[in-house]
C-alpha cells in the first residue's frame, strides 16, 4: 500500500495532489472524511488544477476543473455544472490507518 501523507497534511476543505501508481490523484477532506479522485477531467482528460494543489473553487465547496470551470461534488465526484455535467470524476480508494496515515488501496 502506498502511503500518501498524514491526515493533518490535508485540513478540512483543502486538497492535495499526489503522483501514484494509479496516476495523478487528488485527495480532499470534507466533514472529517477523505475523498480521492483521479486528477483527470471527464470533459477532455486534462488535469484539473491550474496551480499546485489548487483543486477547489473559491468557496472551497466543489472540486473545480481549471480548464472550463466544471464543478464536481466532493462526496461522489459527480459534475453538477459545466460541459461534462452528469459525468463523474473517477474515485480512487484510500484508507486512513490508525498511524494517522492516508494510504492508497492497491
Ligand atoms: S477540461 Fe475540464 S471542464 Fe473542460
Image: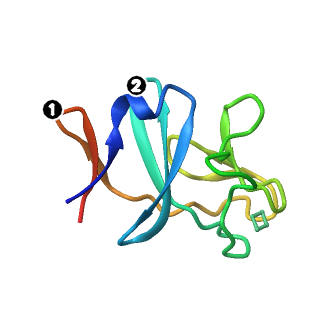
Image quadrant occupied by the C terminus: bottom left
Look at 67% across and 39% down and name the residue there.
62
Q: Is residue 13 above or below residue 28?
A: above
* Dots 1, 2 in contact, CB < 8 A: no
Dot 1 or dot 2, earlier in sequence:
2
Residue 57 percent coordinates (x, y): 74, 39
Residue 17 percent coordinates (x, y): 52, 53
Secondary element at tag 2: loop
Which picture quadrant has residue 50?
A: bottom right
Q: Residue furthest bottom?
A: 44
Secondary element at tag 1: loop
Look at 66% across and 66% down and name the residue there.
47
Look at 44% across and 44% down and name the residue there.
35
Q: Is residue 75 above or below residue 61?
A: below
Residue in front for this viewpoint, 89 or 10 = 10
Establish whether ligand 1 lies closer than 8 Å to the Cβ of label 2: no
Asked whether, in this view, residue 77 is left or right of residue 18, the answer is: right
Residue 97 percent coordinates (x, y): 18, 38
Image quadrant occupied by the N terminus: bottom left
Asked whether, in this view, residue 26 is left or right of residue 99, the answer is: right
Residue 58 percent coordinates (x, y): 78, 33
At label 1, counting other C-alpha atoms closer than 10 Å, the crowd grade (few under 14, some 14-19, many 20 or more) is few
Between the C-alphas of marks 1 and 2, the distance is 15 Å
Which picture quadrant has residue 82?
A: bottom right
Label at residue 32: 2
What residue is shown with label 1?
98
Look at 84% across and 60% down and name the residue there.
68
**Picture quadrant of ligand 1:** bottom right
Asked whether, in this view, residue 56 is left or right of residue 81, the answer is: left
- Between tags 1 and 2, which lies in front? 1
Label at residue 11: none
Amino acid at each position: 500500500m502506498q502511503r500518501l501523507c498524514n491526515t493533518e497534511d490535508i485540513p478540512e476543505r483543502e486538497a492535495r495532489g499526489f503522483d501514484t501508481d494509479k496516476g495523478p490523484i487528488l485527495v480532499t477532506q470534507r466533514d472529517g472524511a477523505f475523498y480521492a479522485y483521479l486528477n483527470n477531467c471527464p470533459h477532455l482528460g486534462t488535469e484539473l488544477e491550474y496551480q499546485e494543489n489548487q483543486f477547489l473553487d473559491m468557496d472551497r465547496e466543489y472540486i473545480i476543473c481549471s480548464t472550463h470551470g466544471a464543478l464536481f461534488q466532493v462526496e461522489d465526484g459527480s459534475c453538477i455544472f459545466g460541459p461534462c455535467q452528469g459525468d463523474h470524476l473517477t474515485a480512487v480508494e484510500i484508507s486512513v490507518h490508525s498511524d494517522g496515515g492516508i494510504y492508497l488501496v492497491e
